[in-house]
């Protein structure tokens, strides 16, 4: 079994921290189900953007867990990153650090893009909600009391789309950003440990 290094302990703690937060997320999802909040979300946002953001959050979060597990292996002595860096130093020392950076952070850049997409989808939902309201106002032939009441109901539906998607997008972006930040910091420490070990 590969020897444990101090940075390997940090990587191990990262994975268990991810497992705990994912457990909290499962509990929160169950609690929302018992309170009928999922149904309210689906009914309040007929565009489906909020559900799409939630699924995006789930996929990226599971990837973060897989990546945290992978970082545990790379933090140990004799890992693939360490071997690749040692070979690169002998074959092309000028590019060794760049290759190590690509191994350690290349995949994170794509995950950061998806995390940013969550908030952008939320803003898209805001635009969709306001377009929904504007289309209802533009379709009014006259403004009597009955029509105004119906218009207010339709405008409320459009506002719900805008607010739900914005809220879900912000929460997803913040949650994913925290996970990816911790992955980046752990990968930085692994890279520093690998470089220091080859000096």
Image (tube, rainbow, N blue to C red):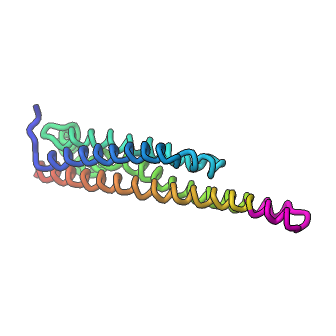
Q: Main secondary structure of the magenta part?
A: helix
Judged left or right of residue 182, residue 83 is left
Q: How many labels does the image show?
A: 0
Q: Residue furthest right?
A: 141
Residue 14 drawn in magenta:
no
Residue 75 in the image: x percent, y percent? 18, 44
The quadrant in which residue 160 appears is: bottom right
Residue 136 is one of the magenta-drawn residues: yes
Q: Residue 138 at what x, y percent from top left? A: 83, 63
User: Where residue 108 appears, x then y in whole percent?
Assistant: 37, 49
> What residue sits 49% from the left and 48% below the top?
35
In front here: 129 or 56? 129
- The answer to whether residue 149 is left or right of residue 98 is right
Q: Which residue sits furthest left?
A: 3
* Nearer to the camera, 89 or 137: 137
Residue 185 shows in the view:
yes
Residue 84 visible in the displayed image: no
In the rendered structure, the answer to whether residue 74 lies left or right of residue 145 reads left
Residue 103 vs 189, above or below: the answer is above
Q: Which residue is drawn at 74% across and 59% down?
A: 153
Q: Which residue is drawn at 57% across and 56% down?
A: 164
- Residue bounds of the magenta highlight: 133-152
Residue at image location 20% in from the left, 54% down from the top = 189
How far across and down, in percent of the image, does residue 116 sit? 48, 56
Quarter of the figure with the N terminus = top left
Q: In this view, does 62 lie above or below 148?
A: above
User: In the figure, is residue 41 to the left or right of 84?
Assistant: right
């Amino acid at each position: 079994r590969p020897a444990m290094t101090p940075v390997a302990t940090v990587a191990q703690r990262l994975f268990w921290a991810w497992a705990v937060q994912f457990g909290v997320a499962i509990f929160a999802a169950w609690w929302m189900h018992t309170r009928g909040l999922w149904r309210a979300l689906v009914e309040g946002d007929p565009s489906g953007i909020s559900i799409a953001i939630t699924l995006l959050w789930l996929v990226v979060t599971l990837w973060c867990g897989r990546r945290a597990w992978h970082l545990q292996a790379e933090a140990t002595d004799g890992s693939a990153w360490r071997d690749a860096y040692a070979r690169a130093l002998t074959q092309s020392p000028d590019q060794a650090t760049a290759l190590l950076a690509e191994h350690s952070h290349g995949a994170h850049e794509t995950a950061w893009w998806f995390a940013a997409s969550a908030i952008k989808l939320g803003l898209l939902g805001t635009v969709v909600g306001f377009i929904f309201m504007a289309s209802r106002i533009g379709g009014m032939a006259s403004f009597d009391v009955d029509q105004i009441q119906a218009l207010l109901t339709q405008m409320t539906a459009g506002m719900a789309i805008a607010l739900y998607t914005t809220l879900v997008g912000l929460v997803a972006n913040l949650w994913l950003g925290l996970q990816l930040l911790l992955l980046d910091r752990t990968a930085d420490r692994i890279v520093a440990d690998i470089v220091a070990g080859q000096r």
